[in-house]
Image: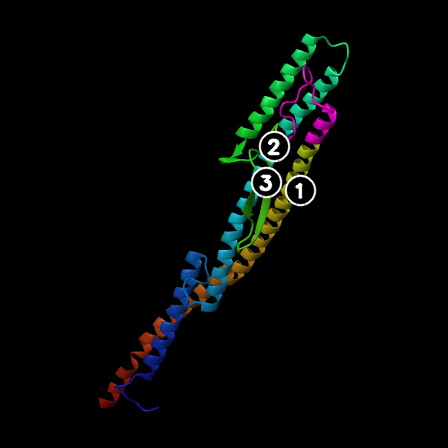
Amino acid sequence: MAQVINTNTMSLMARNNLNHSQSVLGTAIERLSSGMRINSAKDDAAGQAIANRFSSSIRGLTQAARNANDGISIAQTTEGALNEINNNVQRIRELTVQAANGTNSESDLVSIQNEIDQRLQEIDRVSAQTDFNGTKVLSEDKTLNIQVGANDGEIIAINLKQIDSDKLGLSGFNVSDAPTADPLKTIDEALSKIDELRGELGAVQNRFESTVTNINNTVNNLSSARSRIEDADYAEEVSNMTRGQILQQAGTSVLAQANQVPQSVLSLLQ
């Protein structure tokens, strides 16, 4: 090897290797301090794009699960109100059977009718006042669409119906001075309408619960996939940091020695 002083090849080589080991050490420290393997696009542009799509889906699905739980709450609120209406209708049926007893006096029938009227008013009150977050759930026919996915069109519909004394066919129901024709049949038809809506609400609750379970499973799987892409492997990064530290120390020592090589050329001039 020629003895020169203008170009110190060994020093340049040592410096390049030192820069590389410094980069390795810096990357390892950055990943260990952030917990992320991908801290910028330069680390893994394709991986960052995939992880970002996973994050978008995860956030959308997490909100969708909350929406589905709201749907369950709406159905439960509606069903609870229906149960009260059902109790009142059942009591009206009981009173109607009582009124059909020929031993009742006129005052007895008036008393029975008074309670029936109160029960009908309570049915109308429950229908008009039961709401969920400002939405009246029994005062009119309506469809509520609940977003239960991260993409367009992923919805579950809750079909709400108006349930009051009029819709149940009980408006003006009377057992005293002007008795309703076929009163027990009329009440049984009202109970059938209530049972039909309760059945629909129960079915949609089960569907929401199944949806929430599926969403949670999907979120877990997507989170695991995202973690494999963007999260730092601490065992690997600690190893890289240790390796980088050793190379830094060795590289600094070697560079110092390489910088002394031109000094040896001067000995030829002595």
The residue pinned by badge 2 equals 163
Amino acid carrying mark 2 in the image: Ile
Q: Secondary structure at mark 3?
A: helix
Residue neighbourhood size for the residue with mark 3, other residues' Cα within 10 Å, grouped as few (<14), some (14–19), many (≥20)? many
Give the residue displayed 40% in from the left and 61% down from the top: 30
Q: Which residue is mark 3?
A: 72
Residue 235 can be seen in this image: yes
**Which residue in the structure is indicated by mark 1?**
203
Q: Position of residue 108 (x, y in %)?
A: 69, 10
Residue 186: where, in percent of width, then height?
71, 27
Pick the front one: 122 or 243: 122
Q: Which structural element holds mark 1? A: helix
Q: Nearer the viewer, mark 3 or mark 1?
A: 1
Marks 2 and 1, the one that precedes in the sequence? 2
Which comes sooner in the sequence, label 3 or label 1? Answer: 3
Whole-angstrom CA distance, mark 2 to mark 3, is: 20 Å
Judge left or right: residue 53 versus residue 123: left
